[in-house]
Image: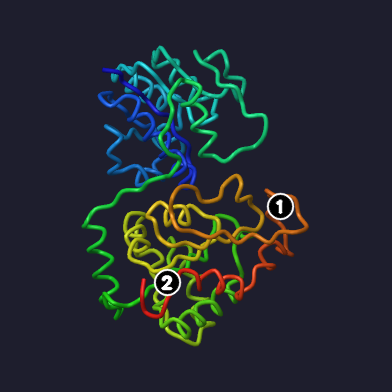
Amino acid sequence: MKRILIVNVNWIGDVIFSTPFIRAMREAYPDGYIACLVHPRAREILELNPALNEIIIYDEEGEHRSPVGKLKLILCLKKKKFDMAFLLHRSFTKALITFLAGIKERAGYPSKSRARLLTKCIEEPSEEIHKVDYFLGIAGSCGIAPKGDYYEFFINDLHRNYIAELLRKEGVSGKDAIVVLCPGGNWDPKRWGKENFAKLADNLCEKYGAKVVMSGAKRDLKLAEEIRGMMKNISIITCGRTGLKEAAALFERSSLVVANDTGTMHLAVAMKAKTIALFGPTSPHLTGPRGDGIYSVISKNDICDIPCYDFTCKDNRCMALITVEDVMQAAAGFLTQNSK
């Protein structure tokens, strides 16, 4: 039985992008033992994934930050006697850890001058490609042909029941159409204007009779409250009241999700929720939704090069070009009066 370690990436959206690779590994090694090394912030992304036998946490800012902490991780991996490691992360340190852990076969891209640490170097793509394809390129170069590029996220009835009860307490019935807005983003230029979200929410309430829910992490609470304060209609805020699993259950229950280019947008797509994704400084070609979900991408950047990482940009023209009317037009294709 092959014992396989997947060394994953660190961010929520990128870890979601890795799930087609994880599924491809299980398809290639149906009887293998497959573990995934991942940052603690992304644990929830992989929990309940039936393709994995084990999730191993690499807390590089905490428990494993020091040389002693890294040595403990290396010894832990060594005891597990993995035969193969697939390095989705480009880190030199992570490649060194798999080498020192005695994993005989180590495949990945030879970035960060780590070619000497790999037994199989995968040729880098000649141009930038979507992260899903970037990860699947490692599988393909190792003779593994994936059966699909859709990503996955798994929840259970505990998460569904939590959301059902939360919505019930907020006065939402099982027959109500729910539109979830995700106004947050890990950097400001990716965020559509809060006044736009407020106007959109009112239009959705008035035209479709929808119940509007604003979803996000605890850090998005202030933003959600500001948007609610601009609205004429009532809205519900779940920021800080859900983990990723419960948020996924909310997306599954929704009639529509409208989100900036964030990990939660990809979470909605993974749950097969009808999703409108708003793109400005980032490229849908590189980080847009993938798979067989029902989604629409709105990107109207006509002047700046993308992706753009000017975090100090004050103009934010790329997001300002997206109008409420643009989003309402896309929403019309997904919504009917009081129905999903």
Quarter placement of the C terminus? bottom left
Q: Would residue 325 appear left or right of 73 to someone viewing this image?
A: right
Dot 2 alpha-carbon crowd within 10 angstroms: few under 14, some 14 to 19, many 20 or more: many
Foreground: disc 2 or disc 1: 2
Residue linked to disc 2: 179
Height in image: 192 above or below 144?
below
Give the tally of numbered discs.
Answer: 2
Query: Which disc, if any, is residue 310?
Result: 1
Q: Amino acid at mark 1?
A: Asp
Q: Would residue 280 appear left or right of 167 to someone viewing this image?
A: right
The percent coordinates of residue 177 (x first, y second) are 36, 75
Residue 151 occupies which quadrant of the picture?
top left
Out of 132 and 109, give the one closest to the viewer: 132
SS of the residue under disc 1: loop
Q: Residue at x 54, y 82 (%)?
A: 230
Q: Residue at x 28, y 52 (%)?
A: 155
